[in-house]
Image: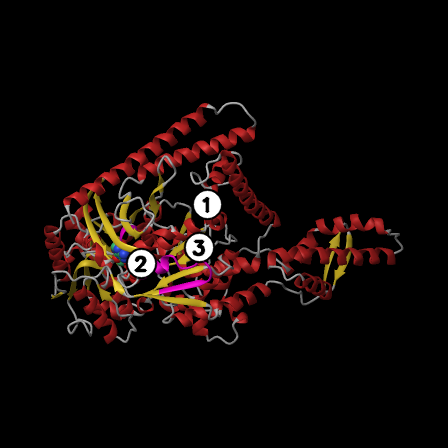
Amino acid sequence: MTSAELANEREYVAALYARLDALRDEAAGELLKVRAGNQGGTHQNRSERDAFARIYEDRVSQLTEIDERLAFGRLTLDDASAADSDGVTHRYIGRIGLRDENLQPILLDWRVPQARAFYQATAANPLGARARRHLTSKGRDIVRIDDEIFDSALLEGDTSALQGEASLLASLTAQRTGRMGDIVATIQAEQDRIIRSELRGVLVVQGGPGTGKTAVALHRAAYLLYSHRERLASSGVLIVGPSRSFLQYIEAVLPSLGETGVVLSSVGQLFPGHDTSADDAADVARLKGSAEMAPLLARAVKSRQIVPREASTVEVNGEKLVVEPQLIRNAMQRAWEGRKPHNVARAAFNKAALSSLARSLAEQLRARGNTIEDSDQAWLREDIRTSYDVKVLLNTAWMPLTPEKLLQDLYARPQWLATLTGDWSPAKRALLHRERDADFTVSDVPLLDEAAELLGEADNKGDAEKRERKQQRKRDIENAEQAIRNMGVEGLVDAESLATGFEGFVERGSTAELAAADRTWTYGHIVVDEAQELSPMQWRLLLRRCPLKSFTIVGDVAQASAAAAATDWDGALSPVFGDSWRLEELTVNYRTPAQIAETAESMAIAHGLVVTRSRSVRSSEWPVDIRETPDVAAAVLDIVRSDRALDALGTVAIIASASQADDLYATLATDLRGGIGRGAAGLRRAVAVLTPQESKGLEFDTAIVVEPQLIVDEIDRGAAALYVAMTRPTQRLHLVASGAIPRGIRTP
Ligand SMILES: Nc1ncnc2c1ncn2[C@@H]1O[C@H](COP(=O)(O)OP(=O)(O)OP(=O)(O)O)[C@@H](O)[C@H]1O
């Protein structure tokens, strides 16, 4: 690399920033114009102008925010027709695409097909590229360039220029902030292939800890939103993660890639209106997650459609009428024929029962010598409908139900549960027992959803309104597309944002907002992270959210530690997707230094876990530190202090089983005061105290794993939990124990 080359790049990137500033000024000018013209016209004209004003505002802030690392790469391509005297063309790759005044591209969005070679070219398969250059910037300035040459003709005898991994290593050793950042500048070829894999079907990405599964899943979401904007704008993308703290950790990645229209949800939040984070004991969670809960709930609903054992007498306007059980049974039969959910079918049941009752009443009155014309049927029906006795009779036979009530009854009424589970042991039934007012747990969420599916909406009006809202959203997007064509601003604004701008017209909300609040919403694509943890009931829920079965599923079966989790993909996925899913593997560990990864893998293998071996891209200077001491808290404090002395701004996780974590936090908080936090709150502090479960998917400069043998012994699937804990650090791992050190750790 010569200083002249660096100077050239500085000049080019400075010109890109100049263009960025000009575009921003232009958008700001347009905004002023739209605002100035914002009087008069029809209501619709005004509303459209409001919408455009919002678009320009967004555009201005997007162009302002993109300032960091606007351009990060350059491809050198063979091009005989190029104006360049060397017969080569350069293409710059960045976070957004830019064109000059003559509409010639001067910067390519990283997601366009022409940018593929930047991520995938190799010397063996250069994909038309002769060289690739990584640009490292500080603020707006380029401070370093690193070249990879695929064509020997371009080498100037100096092969030390082959240092493509330099910017990757720089980003990997950078201090962790407690929030995940994007990796657009350094996406690796095996990752890029997964990111750009086609939208259709089910893609499963398996990889050991730190292989970039989460990073890849998020960049794939950004890629799909960009490449399939038309389809995904109105249906939306859902990203599911294991916990709120995990969502907090990843939430900045998509906005930094310019994508805000996704729904992020933890598994505990997938049933709108409930936000759960606590879970049941392992054996209870395992039962609640098992597929046998689906037929049990179906039986529970069916058993709430009750044919009376004996005839009953109802009073209608002073007239006594005997109602035989057969009349109710027949009405139920009619309702079942419609194959509708319980609350919806109830309307058909009521209708059929009321008609039969009206007929019986008419016959009874006629038998007594009254004249009843056909035209009198209507008021007879009305009399029956408003009769208190009839209401009680029909409601007892077919009560409207909510998912919450169904589940609470099932848990709090052991006798009813017993009638539904004749083949269960009493001990198994007891697992479900709990008080009616107990809080719902994460494992209840898919059961609530299953129940809601079986029950349907209690009032059909709600259903109709939701359908209308969805249709309206589709119409808004079509109108927005038309408006964009009319105003000649294609490429500047997208229909999704413009349609959202129409909400001034009627308060409707963005696709993401609508989707998040609506249980019956079906998404265009779903990304599931830490997917190995999902139970069969959770998979059923997710499938209902995307019947088109367009999924990206990432995880590591060796890290499966939830009670109802699967230990192989086939077992987890075949009941949901059959064999129509494709598997990709990630094999390079970007997070954990080699000596830590090896120790963790050795422990995992010694405990019988099937790990996907991966290659660490680096090692760090700190060997795994094992401390055996009777005073664990003092040792942890000592390690935290020396770690802070080594790296005052780094992040530290203290990972301990639940029985230890709270006490440790209480002890350490006295010494570390505001610098330490428990659970998700710890992620905003220098030191976080977490259980292995809470640490899932996260990473820290240093991890201190406390009483590792207790983690193995106390937690269901404890070895997997310890494997998760040991693979969190990017630099240093300490193990502190007053008791035994788990098998496999001393002999890496
Ligand atoms: N191509 C890349 N360039 C730079 N950093 C990367 C790249 N790929 C992954 N990383 C970094 O490696 C770390 C681990 O990535 P990530 O959290 O996505 O791994 P994971 O496979 O989901 O791990 P786990 O299974 O342990 O949750 C993150 O800091 C991520 O930013």
Give the residue type at disc 2.
Answer: Gln
* Residue situated in front as seen by the camera: 173 or 209: 173
Instruction: Determine crowd level at label 1: few under 14, some 14-19, many 20+ residues with C-alpha closer than 10 A.
Output: some
**Range of residues picked out in magenta:** 184-205
Instruction: Determine crowd level at label 2: few under 14, some 14-19, many 20+ residues with C-alpha closer than 10 A.
Output: some
Gap in Å between the C-alphas at discs 1 and 2?
36 Å
Return the residue at label 2: 120
Give the residue type at disc 1.
Answer: Glu
85 on left or right of 372:
left
Return the residue at label 1: 513
- Name the secondary structure under disc 3: loop
- Name the secondary structure under disc 2: helix
- Name the secondary structure under disc 1: helix
Number of the front mark, 1 or 3 = 1
> Is residue 235 positioned above or below 495 on the image?
below
Instruction: Note whether residue 696 is visible.
Output: no
Number of the front mark, 2 or 3 = 2
Give the residue type at disc 3.
Answer: Leu
Q: Earlier in the sequence, mark 2 or mark 3?
A: 2
462 on left or right of 164:
right
